[in-house]
Amino acid sequence: VTDSVRTTWLTKNSLKYQINPDWRFIAKLNYSQSTSSLGEFYNGSYTEAVAGYGYRPVENDRLNVLMKYTYFYNMPSAGQTTIANTAAAYIQKDHIFSIDALYDLTQTWTVGGKYAHRIGQVSQDLVNPQFFDSRADLYIARLDWHVVHKWDMMLEGRVLSLPDAQDRRSGVLVGLYREVDSYFKVGAGYNFTDFSDDLTNLSYTYQGVFVNVIGKM
């Protein structure tokens, strides 16, 4: 039996500041550093830093826009395994730029969309990393229907383009939501695609039923 000592530091921070009645600034920083007495191969590191602006003009509150930048770095430790005694996956570092928008056409219908671009790199060697590009573009078109009091239906068309992998995926997502109050709703639905709208997630395991919670600024 080999004894080892692991030291892990973790911090989680968030910030929200209302610049004026129309604009809000949001930010968060999640950081973790883990070292092992067994050596560098067993170390781990994680950083997620986000800065964004939310726009909802007082004179036209039908419009909601969120512009966001994300820096993401993940070097998993060997304790995160897929096969016994093998390191989990890869080192990943990303710069992601995104914009989301929703506009209320009427009290019943809302249209929206999202565009996100990832400038990313991935390495499968944890000790002597050799990175290769992993760019991605995500396009989403969305339609919301306010069915009855406090109930909404949602339909999204999604396209994920991966130029470095020469891959392109598309499909739809449907959902039904219940409004809890003016700023909070919960729902469930089905994702007919196999990818997430979170471009830091490189897995394709998202097809199927989902449960979601949404908060508004």
Image (cartoon, rainbow, N blue to C red):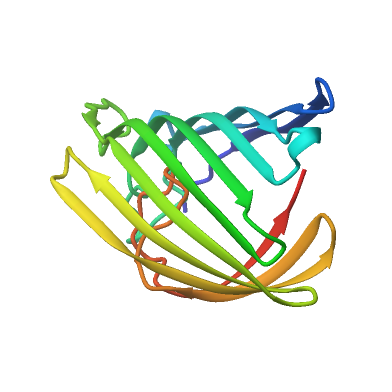
Q: Is residue 44 visible?
A: no
- Residue at image position (75%, 64%) is 185
Where does residue 106 sit, x and y in percent of width and height?
67, 59
Where does residue 126 sit, x and y in percent of width and height?
32, 33
In this picture, is 31 found above or below 197? above
Q: Name the image quarter holding residue 58.
A: top right
Where does residue 174 sit, x and y in percent of width and height?
49, 73
58 horizontally vs 138: left or right = right
Name the one closer to the observer, 217 or 142: 142
212 horizontally vs 139: left or right = right
Q: Name the image quarter holding residue 16.
A: top right
What is the count of numbered marks? 0
Name the one closer to the observer, 27 or 183: 183
In this picture, is 149 found above or below 159? below
Q: Residue furthest left?
A: 166
Q: Which quarter of the figure is the C terminus placed in? A: top right
- Residue at image position (43%, 56%) is 196
- Residue at image position (80%, 20%) is 19
In this picture, is 100 found above or below 204? above
30 horizontally vs 125: left or right = right
Where does residue 2 sit, x and y in percent of width and height?
47, 47
Name the one closer to the observer, 193 or 60: 60
Q: Is residue 148 visible?
A: yes
- Residue at image position (42%, 49%) is 201
